[in-house]
Structures are given as structure tokens and as C-alpha cells.
Image (tube, rainbow, N blue to C red):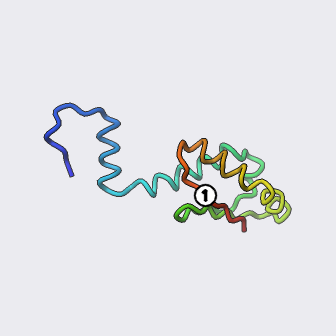
Amino acid sequence: MVKRHQEHQSLSEVLQDFVTDNKLQVGLDKVAVREVWEKIMGPAITKYTQHLKLDKHTLYVQLTSSVLREELSYGKHKIIDNLNQELGKELIKKIVLR
């Protein structure tokens, strides 16, 4: 748990060790996806987004507008690419629009 054999460790290394040791990365990824969705998609689409859920590598998006859902379904691959690029890793492989 605590690595005492290292005398000097940067704060980012200590935090990363804490996240890894306590298996918190999945929860942090879920929060990051929600923030990135709002940033990438903008306020107009975020307004119609009712629920976001990241399960494994699939992002489930519940929308209140069927018209918007249909429009977004045409650009799923571009949305996935933009979200993953902003996240800095390939976290999302599939999007399910509901």
C-alpha cells in the first residue's frame, strides 16, 4: 500500500499510486467521460442529455429528443474519436443512444 522504500516521490506519483492501490480509476473515468461529453457536445446537446453511463468500453447516452438521437447516430464514430482524443486514451469503443 504505502511505498516507504522511496525517499522522494512527486505528488502526481503519490496520487497515481493511491488511485491504483484503491482501484479508483474506473470511477474517475466515469466522471471524466461526463465532463468531456459536456465539453465536446456543447450546451445544446447537453441540454437534451438525460443520463450518461460508462460500462466497460460502452457509453450509454439517454437523450430526451428522438430527432437528436437520430442525428447523433449518423456520427457515432466521430463522437467516439473526439471523446477519446479529449480523454487522452481509448476509453470508449461503442456508443449506445437511447
In percent of width and height, residue 35 lies at: 59, 47
Residue 63, quarter of the rendered image = bottom right
Q: Residue at x 35, y 36 (%)?
A: 12
Seen from the viewer's position, the closer of residues 66 and 85 is: 85
- The reply, left or right, for residue 11 in relation to residue 77 is left
Q: Quadrant of the C terminus?
A: bottom right
In percent of width and height, residue 25 lies at: 42, 53
In percent of width and height, residue 77 lies at: 71, 53
Seen from the viewer's position, the closer of residues 63 and 4 is: 4
Residue 66, quarter of the rendered image = bottom right
Judged from this view, the residue extending furthest toward the bottom is 98
In percent of width and height, residue 86 lies at: 60, 41
Q: Secondary structure at mark 1?
A: loop
Q: Residue at x 71, y 47 (%)?
A: 41
Q: Residue at x 78, y 60 (%)?
A: 73
| Number of dots carrying numbers | 1
- The reply, left or right, for residue 61 in relation to residue 16 is right
Q: Residue at x 30, y 46 (%)?
A: 17
* Residue neighbourhood size for the residue with mark 1, other residues' Cα within 10 Å, grouped as few (<14), some (14–19), many (≥20): few
Figure check: 34 above or below 15: below
Residue 7, quarter of the rendered image = top left
Judged from this view, the residue extending furthest toward the left is 5
- The reply, left or right, for residue 90 in relation to residue 46 is left
- The reply, left or right, for residue 32 in relation to residue 78 is left
Name which residue type carries label 1.
Answer: Lys
The residue singled out by tag 1 in the image is: 93
